[in-house]
Image (spheres, grey):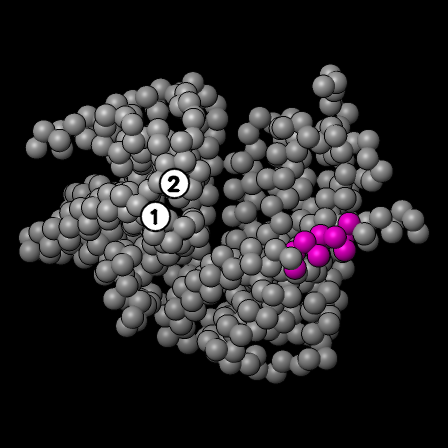
Amino acid sequence: MKAVGKYITVLRISLQNAFVYRSNVLGGFVFYIMFMFVFFNLWRAIYKSGEVAGYSLVQMVWYLCMTELIMFGCRTGVFFQMNEDVKSGSIAYQLNRPYHYVLYQFFNALGGMIFNLLLYGLMAIVIGMIMVGPIPGFSFSTLPYSLISIVLGMCINFFFLMALGLTAFRLEDNTAFYLIYQKLVFMLGMFIPVEFLPGWLQTITRYLPFSYMTWAPARLIVAFSWELFWAVVPVQLLWLTVSFVLTMGMYRYGVAGIQAHGG
Amino acid sequence: MKSLKNIFRLIGLYFKVNLASAMEYRGSFLLQAFGMALSNGSFVFFWWIAFQQIDGTIGGYDFRDVMFIWAVTSSAYGVSNILFANMNAITRLIVSGELDTFLVQPKDTLINLLCARTTLSAWGDLAYGFILMIFTHGSDAGAWGMFLIAIVIGGLLMTAVCVSAHTLTFYFGDASLVGGMAMEFMINFCIYPEGIYRGFVRVIMLSVIPTSFIVHIPLKLARNFHPGWMAALVAVSALYCCLAYRFFYKGLRRYESGNLLITRL
């Protein structure tokens, strides 16, 4: 219990910090509105020729509101934090502290993620309602289940980003990996629903983690069904386990190579 | 005329020094440039999927048109960030007092300031535009001609918008958010068909954030060249750059030195 308690304290402090420095999200709000405005105009132009791959324009706009919400919610800077900690050597100062470095980083970021989810969530609802109105057939009773999927998607993304950041232990410059990862998340679910992809790519995508970060939760919000819920949530749990184990492995492998020379 | 010659000479010298400095870390330089080109490349996939969903055009543009505006935007962004990368740091330099260093040097302050830094990954942006043009426009001489003109005009206009936004720091304090937003708005209005926007946004695209002059008018000229439009494009772009230049120097009069001592290495 004591072991869990310290991480809860870390979470509480990070949540307090997020609320104290709430004006930091102002810039994010502007960018969120801008992206949604651009995408709304783009998809409205595309939809002039009718429904596309099973999504109505209303569903598509809400889908994008949700995928952007997840991505803005995940803006914790964990990749760059890992790079900074490893390259500056400041990670060495955290090794002898009474917490596990990976868990500390996770709970420290979790406060910001919860804060982002609340604020950007409100923003997403306002924008969605203004642009296209309510989601047809949406039921509040299924919202908690969709939220579970959203949180799982954010956690998967967090741990994969952390694992990528920890490659700094062995690589001088890992920015290219970050850019490639980011674009895979964008293209396999965030900007484009998986249903829009060619059949062969849809098959490959279902075996990769990227669509389970954005597509799965956003699809559950715009067109909830229990079949979909039971099809995607277990896979999300599996990818969360994989990403967590990978991060722990990367951390152990990296830490084993640290050489401290005092100072 | 002599002063213009000096400005080009200064830009050329900074370019040589920055390039030599980048070449000291060849591995990092190539990796960053390659990563950026690959990152941009993923958007071809997005547009391919988007055009697969419909028969026809999006906002009046077909796939080749979209690739043209993407190529111009990417290469123009590359040009501005290879030659004038410090444009994104103007606010920081003003707020921290580091501007003093540039004020005491016997060169044009704004040009000296803008050219003092380069962005390695911008080479990837520049190269990406050319690669995209090769694959989508092949040997279309008209399109290539407008592409080359547009990346020069676009690079200068992007820099001018960024300088204007950051110059607001002289008047209202830290304008880094405005500077970041100006750049984001500019890129987002450049990489999507003009026809998807209506009314007020179109006015903005022709005035405050002149993206129509960076990509959309060059595209029209590449499709159907008209000397009058070409002259208007060059004249408006030159006017915008001159106004940004004057605006910076007007703002500079309000700058107060903090007597900060720093060394430029």
Q: Mark 1 lies on which chain?
A: B
Q: What stretch is highlighted in magenta?
A: A10-19
- Asked if disc 1 and disc 2 are in contact, CB closer than 8 Å, the reply is yes
Q: At x 52% / y 65%, what residue is drawn?
A: A64
Quarter of the figure that contains the C terminus of chain A: top right
Q: Is residue A14 magenta?
A: yes
Magenta segment main secondary structure: helix
Q: Which x, y percent locates residue A59?
A: 53, 74
Q: Name the residue under label 2.
A: B94
- Near-viewer residue (B179 or B249): B249
A216 in relation to B248, above or below: below
Label 1 environment density (alpha carbons within 10 Å; few <14, some 14–19, many ≥20):
many
Write the residue at 73% across / 28% down.
Answer: A92
Rendering quarter of residue B121: top left
* Disc 1 target residue: B170
Residue at 47% over, 61% down: A30
Estimate the spatial distance between the alpha carbons at disc 1 and disc 2, rounded to whole Å. 8 Å
